[in-house]
Amino acid sequence: MLKKGEILAFKTDTVWGFGANPEDKDAVFKIYEIKKRDEKKPLILMSDDINNLKKYIKKIPDYAQKLIEKYLPGALTLIFEKSDLCPFYITSNQNTVGIRIPNSPDFFHALNYTKNRVLATTSCNVSGDDPVKNYKEALEKFSFCATIVKPISVDENSNLPSTVILCKNDDYKVIRKGVIKL
């Protein structure tokens, strides 16, 4: 499905998400269209393993590696300086990219639809609206434009966003408070 440029909607450990093949520019722009999202707002990359995400990042500082080891998989999004391999259309031409590894068997199940085990992602909603809360709502709102991956676990999540951390230089900055308290 992702090879054909389709969009997935899937459950994570925080909120439901949309995902596309990060190497497929047209598919990534479909997410922007579905969400009515400003193209100046970047997407993030999700995977089940930090090693799948490293090629998109210039470097991981030591303090960030400790955050990865302590909190991932989990509700933490880390923003790093992007590498030259990270597509500009995911980052909205910014020099940083957000990465996350959800603690979610449903997300890991959704990754079975992709070869490289990485998705360009954002929350499953129209911009400005609350993210969908469950499989039924995802089907009702987005089955016309996305493949809705049926959850394999109980269809509940925190409905709270991930904590977002900007990792620059020698320290980090909390950009958005979420599930993880730092």
Image (cartoon, rainbow, N blue to C red):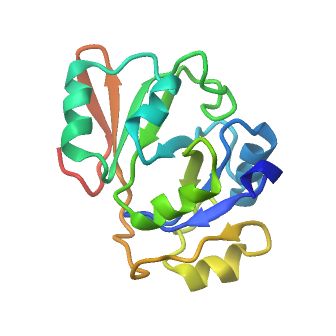
User: Which of the 4 quarters of the picture holds residue 66?
Assistant: top left
- Residue occupying the point 68% across, 58% down: 35
Residue 161 on image: x %, y %: 38, 58
- Quadrant of image for the N terminus: bottom right
> Residue 12's x, y, as percent?
44, 63
**Which of the pair 56/105 is nearer the observer?**
105
Q: Position of residue 71 (x, y in %)?
A: 23, 46
Marker count (numbered)? 0
Is 13 on the left-hand or right-hand side of 181?
right
Q: State the residue at coordinates (25%, 28%).
A: 65
Q: Is residue 99 left or right of residue 23?
A: left
Q: Quadrant of residue 81?
A: top left
The structure residue drawn at horizontal position 51% and vertical position 21%, both measured from the top left corner, is: 82
Looking at the rendering, which quadrant does residue 118 occupy?
top right
> Measured along the vertical axis of the image, is residue 126 above or below residue 22?
below
The answer to whether 23 is drawn above or below residue 87 in the figure is below
Residue nearest the viewer, comparing 36 with 120: 120
